[in-house]
Amino acid sequence: MKSIKLAVCLLTLSLLVAGCATTREGQSHGGMETQAQTHMVDGITIKPGYPLPEDGEKLHKALNLNRAIELFLWALPINQSYAGRDGLLAASGGELMDINYIGNFSDHQVGLSTLNNETIYVVINLDLKAGPVVYEQPAMDKKGYMFGSIIDVWQVSLADVGVPVVAPDQGKGGKYLILPPGYSGKTPDGYFPIQSPSYAVTLGLRSVMLGKATVNDAIARAKQIKVYPLSQPDKKQTYRNLADRPIEAEIDTGLGAFKRMHEYINSEPIYDKDKYMVGMLKSLGIEKAKPFPSDSEHTKLYKKAAALAWMTAKKGTTIHWEPAFGGWFAIGRPETWLPDYTSDDAILIDRRAAYFTLGIWPPKHMGGSTFYAHTFTDANGKPLLSGVNYVIHLPPEVPAKDFWSVILYDAERFTMIENEQAKYAISSLNKNLKMNADGSFDIYFGPDMPKGLEENWIPTTENDFWVGFRFYGPDWERLGKSWLTKRPKRVR
C-alpha cells in the first residue's frame, strides 16, 4: 500500500515538474510566446537573451555573407552594363560614343548575354557627364529596320526605337536627344527628348533584315547611325566592325562584381532607391569616395558571396518566369511586362535577378517587335541533358511575321553554346531547312546528327545548356492560342 502511495506521489511530482517546465518554455509575456529551450543553428547557440560572447563574430559574419549575396543579385543589371561597356571597349580599342557593330552573325566568341545569330548587332556606350547626346535613328524600309532600346545603367529601357507603335519615331527614323541626370537646360525642337537617370547609357540595337536583304544591307543601315554631343553636331563619327573578334563581356561572377558596385556609387547619382544598397555596401567596407577594400578578409568575403550568389542566380533562371505556351517560359508577356520589374506594391526581385543573369537590353514594350520563350526542361519536365538527343516539333505557319529562331545557350556564360560545327541556331531564314509535307518543321539538337537532317540539327557538347525560341514580328492572334509547340522531346 505504501509503495502505491509512493508511486502516486512520484507521478504527481513529475507531472508538476513537467508542467512547470512547459510553462517556463512556453510562457506568455504580454501575449507573446517565448521559447527558453537552448539549441544550436549552424554552430550558433540559440538562447534567451543576448548571444554568447563567442557567437558574436559568427553572427556578424553570417549577416555580412547574406548581405553580400543579396547585393550581388540586386546589382546584376549594373554588372551587365559595365561588363558590356568594358568588353566592347577592350575588343574595339575605341572610345565611348563609337558605333560598334558586329559585321556578321554572332557566335560563341561574342560574350554578350543571349544574342542571336540572325541579326547584325550595334552597341553604343555613352557617358552623359559632358551634356546631352544626340542619337540619329535610321528609318525602316522594305529591307529591314534598326530595332532596340536606349537603356540606363540599371538596364531599364528609357525608350524603344525603330519600330511602329512602341517607338517614338514610329519606324520613320528621327533624332533622339538623351539628357543627363538633373538636366534643366532648354530642349531644342525637332528631337525626341529622353531623360536618363544615369550618366552611363547603352544603346543596344539589332539591324534586322527583311525580304531579300543581305548582311551588307544590314551593315549599311548601321552606318546610317550618328551619335554626337548636342554641342558638337560636326563631330567625326567612328564606326568599328567587331566581326570575328572575341568580345569578353560576360558579367563578372567574382570579386569584380563588387568592384562594379563601388564604381556605381562613385560615378552615378544616388537616389532614394539606392540608399538601402549603399548602406549595406558600407557595412561590407565599400564606401563612396574611399578605395575599394583590398585586405584579405574583405576579399575572401566578396569571393565567397559571389560564388554562392552566382549558383543561386543560375538556379533562379530555371524557375522565376511567367508561362508562355506548351510548358515554355516567357522572358516577359506583353500584358504583364514591367521593364523595371516594379509593380504597384512590390519589386519582383527573383524574376529581376533571373532576367539579368541571362539577359541584357530589355525593351520598354515587350512584344512590339519581338517575343522570347525558353525552356530548361524536356516534355516530361526533366532537365535538358548534354548527352541526350531531342526534337522540337513546330506546327505549320509559325506565328512570326518577320522570322523565327530556335537557339541553344550555354548555361554558364549565357552565350551561344560552343561546338565544333559552329552551329548555334535553326531559323526560318535558312532556306535549306527541311520542311515536312504538312508545312511543319522538326528541329533536332543533341550529340548525334539525324541522318539527312543536318540543316535541322544543332550539336551539343558536354556543357549544360538551355533552349531559346525567338519570334520576330510575333502574331499575337495565333501565338499560344491556335498555334503552340511543346517542349523538346527525347529522341529514342
Image (spheres, grey):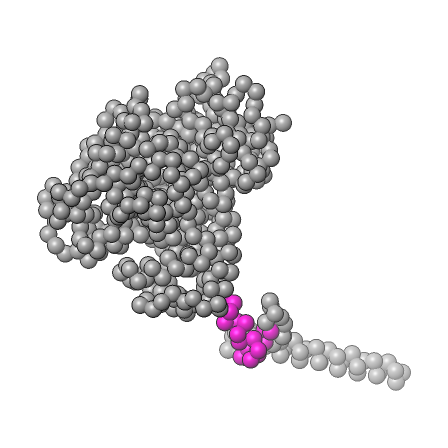
User: From the viewer's perspective, is residue 379 above or below residue 95?
Assistant: above
The x, y position of residue 435, in whole percent, is 47, 18
Q: Which of the 4 image quadrants contains residue 371?
A: top left
Q: Which of the 4 image quadrants contains residue 358?
A: top left
The rendered magenta stretch, by its main secondary structure, is classed as helix
The residue at the point 17 percent across, 53 percent down is 131
Q: In the image shown, does 252 or 403 lie closer to the viewer?
A: 252
The x, y position of residue 241, in whole percent, is 31, 36
Q: Can residue 56 be found in the magenta stretch?
A: yes
The residue at the point 46 percent across, 56 percent down is 254
Q: In the image shown, does 303 or 145 lie closer to the viewer?
A: 303
Q: Residue furthest top?
A: 437
Q: Which of the 4 image quadrants contains residue 94?
A: top left
Residues shaded magenta: 45-64
Residue 86 can be seen in this image: yes
Q: Residue furthest front?
A: 93
Left or right placement of residue 369 versus residue 316 in this view: left
The x, y position of residue 213, in whole percent, is 30, 23
Q: Quadrant of the N terminus?
A: bottom right
